[in-house]
Amino acid sequence: MRQISRRDALIVGGLGTAATVAGAAGLWWSLTSPQQPAGVGGGAAPVQGAELRGPAELRSADGLLQLTLDAAPGGVELGGRRASALCYNGTVPGPTLRLRPGDELSVRLENGLTAPTNLHLHGMHVSPEADADNVFRTVLPGQGFDYRYRLPPDHPPGVYWYHPHHHGMVADQIFAGLFGAIIVEDPEAIPVSTERVLLVSDTTLDSAGNIAAVSPMERMAGREGELLLLNGQSNPLLTSAPGARERWRIINTCVARYARLRLDGQQLQLLGMDSGRSPEPETVDELLLAPGNRADLLVTAAAGEAVLQALRYDRGAMPGMMGRGPVRAGGASALATFRVIGSTAIPTDAVTPGAATSRPAQEDLRTAAVAARRQLVLSMGAGLRGGGGGMGGMMRFTINGREYSEARTDTTVTAGTVEEWALVNTSPMDHPFHLHVWPMQLIDDNGRAAGSVVMRDVVNVPANGRATVRIAFRDFSGRSVYHCHILDHEDLGMMGVIEVR
Ligand SMILES: [Cu+2]
């Protein structure tokens, strides 16, 4: 492995502080989520405590949602500071799309950026081909493209999201603001007093309000921004009344940051994660959302003020580093403040827990006939990326020893079959594994067998650990991808091509 330059070492994981450097390569740093600094990027502290804003909502009617998404630079407020970001339709996050199973979604994507882009519907069970969820398509600057997606009539309801997926630029474009929520509505609405769409993101602004560039070291670690944001705001205020039952749709859109969430003093019930549904609401104290994961949560409000905390999560350390750095003080960052005031005004019979329990039964692949078993090994290694041209000093990020190549098909699957994949992580960092189009059922999570049907489209594979999933390759055929959802790792090559035929 080539030595890491001191310059690289000084720009570390979103801390903005110098790492311990003992000789050029004697560097170590923790990938624990950093505490949100009080003031960043030129000394201006993020403005906190404003009332939460929600993105604009666009809803399908008569089975169709038709819209234009303009991806372009724009001036927005991030954490209360003026920022030059990348926006969909002028905002960060972009508009929320509300769809129903069986709908058609028609999106005209206009590329007003200076770089190529495209569009991916994360977690959606739609075709990966032609003008649908085709990540191999490129939309050049100044050009547009008409995407058309048809949701199957039995598409799972839940929380999804959209973002660019042009290989090599995914992390930069999402870090700069290109993401938005998709809600696929339940067949029968769950009665709640308030529904909130909450997009967790992070980014770093320089003193001029531009999105900060990141170093090769930050890319290898997976960048974590200095500003932790909820709907583009820093620690916004959510107000509610005692007894209110709220539905929170939480999306972790961060490039690399794990969201380990708590809301102490309030009752939380998990309806589902990703496209997976709990058979009945599951009481939880804490939620871990890897990058890309979503939670569908019921919050029953109790009087008082609670802080939605993002706790530190240790996702491992870079390989090949020596010694241990200092343990940093501090713990959680405040993602939002939940203020519950006033008198109980919610008719409790309208929000009985039973009203949320009638979930459609999910198929259980644990008893399915398995047509093929595969092993996918996620590795980080010394050695020069792509022969070393231009990216000297970068570690290799591979799946089964290979870096991503669009031209190569890594995995060929027979349409209609069920496969079992062992996801093996030989590196000392966690990698959240994402498969497009076809949801994964978690069978074994690092030695713990799943006790129920757990459907995910992002499965965290812990450092030096493993996970086993089963996948039903139903409904759609075509070429698509799987990859690490630390999007810097994806851009660096930790992605493979699957063809279902
Ligand atoms: Cu990774």
Image: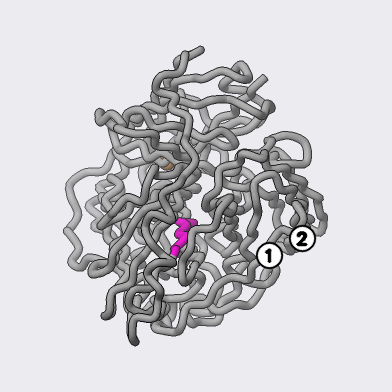
Corner quadrant of residue 446: top left
Residue type, mark 1 in image: Leu
Q: Position of residue 113 (x, y in %)?
A: 71, 61
Q: Quadrant of the C terminus?
A: top right
Residue type, mark 2 in image: Leu
In the rendered structure, find residue 67 and report the number of the disc placed on it.
Answer: 2
Q: Is residue 248 magenta?
A: yes
Mark 1 closeness class: few <14, some 14–19, many ≥20 residues within 10 Å: some
Q: Is residue 318 magenta?
A: no
Q: Is residue 309 above or below residue 482?
A: below
Quick check: which quadrant has ligand 1?
top left
Q: Position of residue 1 (x, y in %)?
A: 37, 35
Q: Residue at x 41, y 65 (%)?
A: 351
Q: Is residue 312 left or right of residue 126?
A: left
Mark 2 lies within 8 Å of ligand 1 (Cβ measured): no
Q: Residue at x 32, y 63 (%)?
A: 310
Which label lies toward us, 2 or 1? 1
Do callouts 2 and 1 mark residues in contact (Cβ within 8 Å)?
yes
In the rendered structure, find residue 339 and report the number of the disc placed on it.
Answer: none
Corner quadrant of residue 297: bottom left
Q: Is residue 263 above or below residue 75?
A: above
Q: Residue at x 32, y 28 (%)?
A: 444
Q: Position of residue 381 (x, y in %)?
A: 38, 32
Q: Residue at x 25, y 47 (%)?
A: 26
Q: Which residue is mark 1?
A: 58
Q: Which residues are magenta?
A: 247-253
Q: Is residue 123 left or right of residue 455?
A: right
Mark 1 lies within 8 Å of ligand 1 (Cβ measured): no
**Which residue extends farthest bottom?**
342
Query: Taken as a whole, is the magenta stretch helix, strand or loop?
Result: strand
| Whole-number angstrom distance, CA of label 2 to CA of label 1 | 8 Å
